[in-house]
Amino acid sequence: MTEQNGPIALSMTKKLDDALQPERLEVINESHLHAGHQDSFDGSGETHFRIRLVSPIFAGMPRIARHRMINELLKDELSASVHALAIEPAAPGETVRW
């Protein structure tokens, strides 16, 4: 599930879906929440994201390894226009706050 269907969100969704075959996936554009944090940033575009992901691939994997895997999958977006990425990874059956 993608909250905003911009090209960066769609690219991230496809990469995560293809690689991790998630049971649940949300790529949420939170850029608007950061308007005014810098003088020149009005909150538009696709710069700040939150990823909520449940994948069986994460079973038994430490949290830091999950984050590293996602960061590696999205390295192109992170090195280009994505300024911030909040990651909430889980394996099936793990308790999530969302």
Image: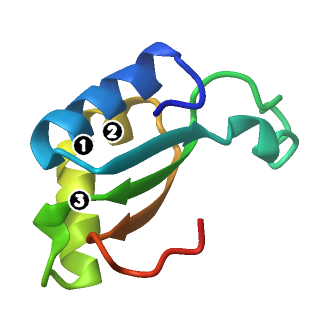
- Helix, strand, or loop for circle 2? helix
Instruction: Give the residue number, with chain letter if any, for mark 3.
Output: 55
Query: Residue sitting at 36 percent across and 66 percent down?
Result: 89
Q: Residue furthest front?
A: 93
Q: Which mark is residue 75?
A: 1
Q: Are marks 2 and 1 in contact (CB under 8 Å)?
A: yes
Which of the two discs, 3 and 1, sits closer to the camera?
3
Identify residue type, mark 3. Ser
Quadrant position of residue 56: bottom left
Disc 3 is placed on an element classified as loop
Left or right side of 17 for 6: right
Task: Name the amino acid, label 2.
Answer: Ser
Q: Is residue 22 above or below residue 1?
A: below
Left or right: where 41 falls relative to 45: right
Question: Alpha carbon of mark 3 to alpha carbon of mark 1: how far?
Answer: 19 Å
Residue at the image point whose x is 14% and y is 34% from the top: 18
Mark nearer the N terminus (3 vs 1): 3
Q: Nearer the viewer, residue 30 or 47?
A: 30
Quadrant of the drawing holding the C terminus: bottom right
Inspect the image, locate mark 1, and give the three-letter code of the amino acid beneath it: Lys
Decide: is 2 above or below 7: below
**In the picture, residue 75 is in which quadrant?**
top left
Who's the residue at 11% across and 42% down the image? 19
Q: Does the residue at mark 3 contact the one at mark 1 (Cβ under 8 Å)?
A: no
Task: Name the residue rendered at 59%, 74% in the picture.
Answer: 97
Mark whose residue sits in front, 2 or 3 = 3
Question: Residue 60 in the image: x percent, y percent?
Answer: 13, 84
Q: Which colouring convention does the figure follow?
A: rainbow
Q: Neighbour class for label 3 at 10 Å: few (<14), some, many (≥20)?
A: some
Front label number (2 vs 1): 1
Residue 66: mark: none
Residue to which mark 2 is pinned: 79
